[in-house]
Amino acid sequence: MAIASAFKALCLSLLFVAAASHPTVRSKVFNVRRYGAKSDGKTDNANAFTNVWKSACARKSGNSKIYVPKGTFYLGGVEFVGPCKNQIEFVIDGTLMAPSNPKDIKQDTWINFRYINYLFISGSGTLDGQGKQSWPLNDCHKNTNCPKLAMTMGFAFVNNSRINGITSLNSKMGHFNFFSVHHFNITDVTITAPGDSPNTDGIKMGLCSNIHISNTQIGTGDDCIAILSGSSNLDISNVNCGPGHGISVGSLGKNKDEKDVKGLTVRDTIFNGTSDGIRIKTWESSASKIVVSNFVYENIQMINVGKPINIDQKYCPHPPCEKNGESHVQIQDLKLKNIYGTSTEKVAMNLQCSKSFPCKNVELIDINLKHNGVKGGPSTAVCENINGSARGKMVPQHCLN
């Protein structure tokens, strides 16, 4: 018994020595209130937030945590620029409120992060874009003098980072914009704007790689997720999309210097009341020759979706378009497996590929999409310039070559 007690005491003392020799460096907390931020919903806190960022970013020993407590913090346009000396945790438990007048934001993005590694944004708070006043101004397709509206939150040249838990509400334009971002996780985020709010894309990304989006709710007036030129190795799972225009790749091919899009997995996802579900769109008159390849869509439920599966290589959102020939975007190596549910349009599977660059190696496995629209009759499929194979249950009947 005495030996056991002595051994236990020795273990405890060794444990204490080990703990003392490896001290845990806690993050230093930078509370925005201590830098003069006021949660009265009307004082512009841009300078206070910028000063907090400068202090947190410059800290050399240990990590920094910027904390936004509960309350409503009015915020004009802000930019948080690195590189920083350490990793930054940005915890938002309060509401950040944008100016309601779009002219009061003098930059493309309301809250912008640039040139940062190891940025971790989390919290139970809300980004309130106050977009209602801006939406009627969003008429650029017919008005060349339309005002430039700000996205809610942007990330450019931000790597090895993540965003978790926060809500983005009523953006003026898109909610989250990613440009040249690599190794980034988006989890448990809520994105919401009315279904008739124009161009309020949920998540937009271009020239990005290794982006993971999971357990996220997105309802907007445009694409839930928009994947643009030069993006690769993207994984999207357990997303609820609706209202909105689905998960879209493109539009692609309009501009001369576009890059390939490759490596996309969308799985275990629900589209509810969206205009489209799975969507790839390329301009009919392409300025660039690029390849879209290695896509997998698996275990996806469609609930009253206009076009559940829509490959559109004659994309023309605002006629009349210049019709200079076929799309030069090559789509290949697509697998669609276990896609099921209901469509509101009779054409549940629209596969309109380019005559000059037909779609190649498109694999359909267990498709079950029933028509649930006003016009009666079973669902149908349209195929143009597409080669591939089909197996398993097939509703509507496929039309692959």
Image (spheres, helix red, strand yellow):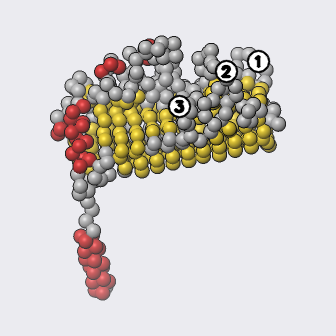
Residue 384 drawn at (x, y percent) = 77, 30
Reading the image, the residue beneath label 3 is: 224
In space, the residues marked 3 and 1 are separated at their CA atoms by 29 Å
| Tags 2 and 1 touching, CB below 8 Å | no
Q: Check disc 1 and report its element: helix, strand or loop.
A: loop
Circle 1 is placed at which residue position? 376
| Mark 2 in CB contact with mark 3 (< 8 angstroms) | no
Res. 368 in view: no
- Disc number at residue 323? 2
Which of pointers 2 and 3 lies earlier in the amino acid sequence?
A: 3
x, y percent for residue 39 = 23, 29
Name the quadrant of the N terminus: bottom left
Q: Tell me whether the residue at label 3 lies in contact with that at label 1, contact meaning CB atoms closer than 8 angstroms.
A: no
Residues under labels 2 and 1: Cα distance? Answer: 34 Å
Q: Secondary structure at mark 2?
A: loop
Q: Residues within 10 Å of mark 3 (few under 14, many from 20)?
A: many
Residue sitting nearer the eye, 233 or 274? 233
Q: Residue furthest bottom?
A: 3
Q: Quadrant of residue 157?
A: top left
Q: Residue, x 21% and y 25% (percent of image)?
A: 43
In this orientation, which residue lies closer to the viewer: 270 or 329?
Answer: 329
